Image (cartoon, rainbow, N blue to C red):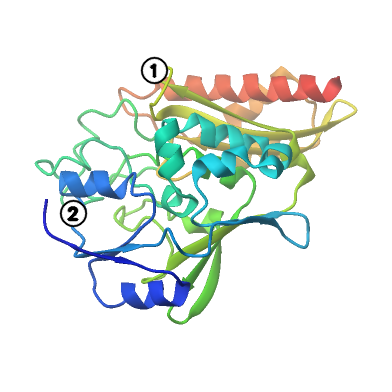
Amino acid sequence: MREFGYERVFDVPGAVALLGTGPDARFLGGGTNLVDLMKAGVERPTLLIDVQELPLNTIEFTPDGGLRIGATVTNSDLAAHTEVRRHYPALAQALLAGASGQLRNMATVGGNLLQRTRCGYFSDLAQPCNKRVPDSGCPAIAGEHHNHAILGASEHCVATHPSDMAVALAAFDAVVSYETADGPGELPIAEFYRPVGETPHIETALPPGALITGVTLPSAAVAAHSRFRKVRERASYAFAIGSIAAALDVQDGAVREVRLAFGAVASRPWRARAAERALTGGPADTEAFAAAADAELAAAEALPENGYKVTLMRNLVVSVLTELAEEAAR
């Protein structure tokens, strides 16, 4: 491993200022992704800035009844929080579906948002990868891609985003807060992750030098009636091959409000807006759920080995929404 410096910081301005001292400095939260990438040689920071002692480890209500989550809250603490489980159950379920207990005890909210893709070509320095080295190529398109994107991909990259937590945050319209040397800022999560387009190496809209300080979940009654489901290739400790975060409000058999976000099908958490539009105001039954899934997945562009994800996601939409509708009818 290459030599690098290490500094622990205790206040946000100090952390931001220290990052600005060198172009190859990186913030270190739990390190569950960054350290792996350093071992592989994908990340080569000259300085690690340990942010775990920053005063960003609280979860508190906002004035409108939402929740403000600090960036250094661990995945375990967030999943176990009483108000998260009560008001945003899909978020707690998504966190518990991710990684192992040991990793959840270390991983932080800020770091989870910035996870890099698990595409094998990205972490293999012997292979080209447009996400790692711009304009070097994407061998996954003609190579191994059974777990790659079917929505929103481009000829430059077909990798998927690995975070389960971010899928639930997308369904709940979370807002990411950050701090820069010029002051604080916010990004709705729908704008936080950039479309892959021609620049897959630019994954977020965070300004240069920004430190994520927290995430705000707006108050939403529908979020209390939510569920996250993840399909993976083994029962534990595996990344999703398809996942869904869904929330449903049904009144008199009709859909009053619905939220849907997909995971492991695109370079970012995929908010299923077409499906939501198709469902809102209509019947809450399996035929409508299937039609809505078809409306969303009409945009899918599968490669030879990942077409199964279209059927997988259709089945996830129908099964999870059917369960939520049955619960609403009791």
In the image, what residue type sits under mark 1? Arg
Q: Residue furthest bottom?
A: 182
Quadrant of the rendered structure where residue 69 is?
Answer: bottom right
> Which of the two discs, 1 and 2, sits closer to the camera?
1
Q: Is residue 157 left or right of residue 3?
A: right
Q: In the image, is 126 to the left or to the right of 6?
A: left
Would you say 194 lies left or right of 291 here? Answer: left
Most foreground residue, 132 or 286: 132
Please state which amino acid type lies under the numbered disc 2.
Val
Estimate the x, y position of residue 18 in percent, counting from the top left.
33, 75
Check residue 257 in the rendering and tell me which mark sits there, or answer none: none
Task: Let me know if residue 152 appears in the view.
Answer: no
Q: Residue 133, which numbered label?
A: 2
Number of disc labels? 2
Query: In the picture shown, does residue 113 fall above or below 186?
Result: above
> Considering only vertical position in the picture, is 205 above or below 287?
below
The answer to whether residue 137 is left or right of residue 159 is: left
Question: Residue 91: where, in percent of width, then height?
Answer: 60, 39
Q: Quadrant of residue 40?
A: top left
Give the residue at mark 1.
234
Q: Nearer the viewer, residue 319 or 176?
A: 176
Q: Position of residue 176 (x, y in %)?
A: 54, 60
Q: Which residue is depicted at the point 39% across and 54% down?
A: 29
Report helix, strand or loop for mark 2. Answer: loop
